[in-house]
Image (cartoon, helix red, strand yellow):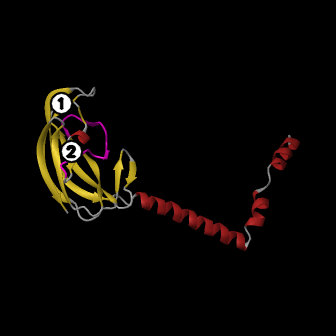
Amino acid sequence: MRQKKNLLTNKFPKLENITSGVMNHKGKIILMALAILFVFGVTRSRADESNDIQAEGSPVEIHESVQLTALNEDEQRLNQKFDVNITSAQRQKRVLVRGQWLRARDGKLFLVVNMDIKNNIRTAMHAFPQDWLRLVKEEGKSIAPTAHQGLIEIRPLSTKETNVAFVIDENEKDFTVDVGAVDQLDKRFDVQF
């Protein structure tokens, strides 16, 4: 038994033998510097990620409402309608889409339109907010949102907050947005920064 114990202890070098050469004065300084750089790097990368939306100016309050037809989970139209309240708009350098940050190219920003969708019935409804909003350009061209959350579920008797985003030139400050079903325009509103 004693021989077995000696074999095990001889197999693995002792910790003080490994660290004795490294832990001299210079080694401790280098190790401390590496630890500080690591902590700074992790903190910095998390700060960059949590630097939110990188907003350009203050949000603009909108307060426009429409009623739209709901979809079921198979994307078929239901008889029920739900309220969509367009609450605000913001010019941003970054936007969060399905858990991933998207960054606008140089010279571009995102026009993010925020909304609340209210479900007043006792069953879940589904919606494609990207189908309801269009950015109207000067030439009359309707632009669909570039970034959106896809098919969203609005739980029974609840309100869902969501948004869509359009790519815009960074010097643009006046916008016209259409809101409504694909086959029917319900409202048009202007956003000015």
Q: Quadrant of residue 25?
A: bottom right
Q: Which residues are magenta?
A: 139-158
Q: Is residue 3 above or below residue 88?
A: above
Q: Separation of disc 2 and disc 1 at Cα?
A: 26 Å
Q: Residue at x 34, y 53 (%)?
A: 95
Tell me if 20 is positioned left or right of 133 in this view.
Answer: right
Which-is-in-front pick, marks 2 and 1?
2
Q: Is residue 64 above or below residue 42?
A: above
Label number found at residue 122:
1
What's the magenta bit mostly, secondary-structure-wise?
A: loop
Q: Nearer the viewer, residue 11 or 84?
A: 84
User: What's the residue type where badge 2 is placed?
Assistant: Leu
Whether residue 140 appears in magenta in the rendering, the answer is: yes
Label number found at residue 133:
2
Q: Which x, y percent locates residue 113?
A: 23, 51
Q: Residue at x 51, y 60 (%)?
A: 42
Q: Nearer the viewer, residue 12 or 138?
A: 138
